[in-house]
Amino acid sequence: MNEMVEEFLADGRDRMDKAVVATHNEFNTIRTGRASTALLDRIIVDYYGSKTPLKQLANLSAPEPRLLVITPYDKSGMKDIEHALMESELGLNPNNDGNVIRLSIPELTEERRHELVKVVKSLAENGRVAVRNIRRHVLHDIEELQKDGEISEDDLRRTKEDFQKVTDKHIEKIEEMLKHKEGEILEV
């Protein structure tokens, strides 16, 4: 097969892998019934005028299944961290004792579980769309090679079939992650 085709396919596979990982990371930020420090990954704190990720400002831990503990490296940033947590979409009330901030994770209601499943399904669809867009871009580049006479129509057809299989495997991974995450959310 043409060297340029191989480069396009390798690049496409790499980008699809990254799209699957990004979707997995997004799933981790969605709250399930138990505490996970990944819930705090999207929290950005306005720290002395600059937007800083919470995990750069504090040690995050989950000592119990329903408790997150945030230990700021700089105690003067406690109020900023507390404010960012209250403003976040987590819907959790921080408990500040002056040294650490505790976040109690309440039981999810049935209604909230179903809302979270919808959010997760939306994130999965975004991941699938990203994978399909990568496929479309790669195939467009390969079709250009065929138009320029660098590869034959048979090679183009074979490459499209092979790359569709790669695309299907990546979408399948996202589907598996979705089923797993749905199970976690709906688990009582």
Image: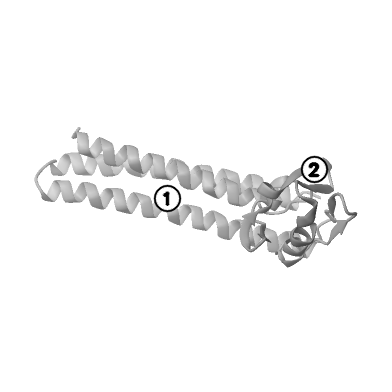
Which image quadrant for residue 156? top left
Which image quadrant for residue 150? top left
Q: Which mark is residue 131?
A: 1
Q: Which residue is pictured at 56% across the width and 57% down the height?
A: 123
| Horizontal side, residue 47 vs residue 149: left or right | right
Q: Position of residue 180 (x, y in %)?
A: 65, 44
Depicted 91 relative to depicted 172: above or below: below
Q: Is residue 162 visible?
A: no
Q: What is the quadrant of the N terminus in the image?
A: top left
Q: Which residue is pictured at 84% across the width and 48% down the height?
A: 67
Q: Amino acid at mark 2?
A: Ala
Q: Position of residue 41 (x, y in %)?
A: 65, 51
Towards the viewer: 160 or 129: 129
Towards the viewer: 90 or 100: 100
Q: How many marks?
A: 2
Name the secondary structure under disc 1. helix
Towards the viewer: 159 or 131: 131
Furthest residue toward right: 97
* Dot 1 or dot 2, earlier in sequence: 2
Q: Amino acid at mark 1?
A: Val
Question: What residue would you read off at disc 2?
Answer: 62
Contact between labelled residues 2 and 1, with CB atoms less than 8 Å apart = no
Q: Which residue is pictured at 42% across the width and 44% down the height?
A: 16
Q: Which mark is residue 144?
A: none
Depicted 188 relative to depicted 165: above or below: below
Q: Position of residue 146 (x, y in %)?
A: 14, 47
Furthest residue toward left: 149
Label 1, label 2: how far apart the Cα atoms are: 33 Å
Q: Which residue is pictured at 21% across the width and 38% down the height?
A: 4
Q: Is residue 20 visible?
A: yes
Name the secondary structure under disc 2. strand
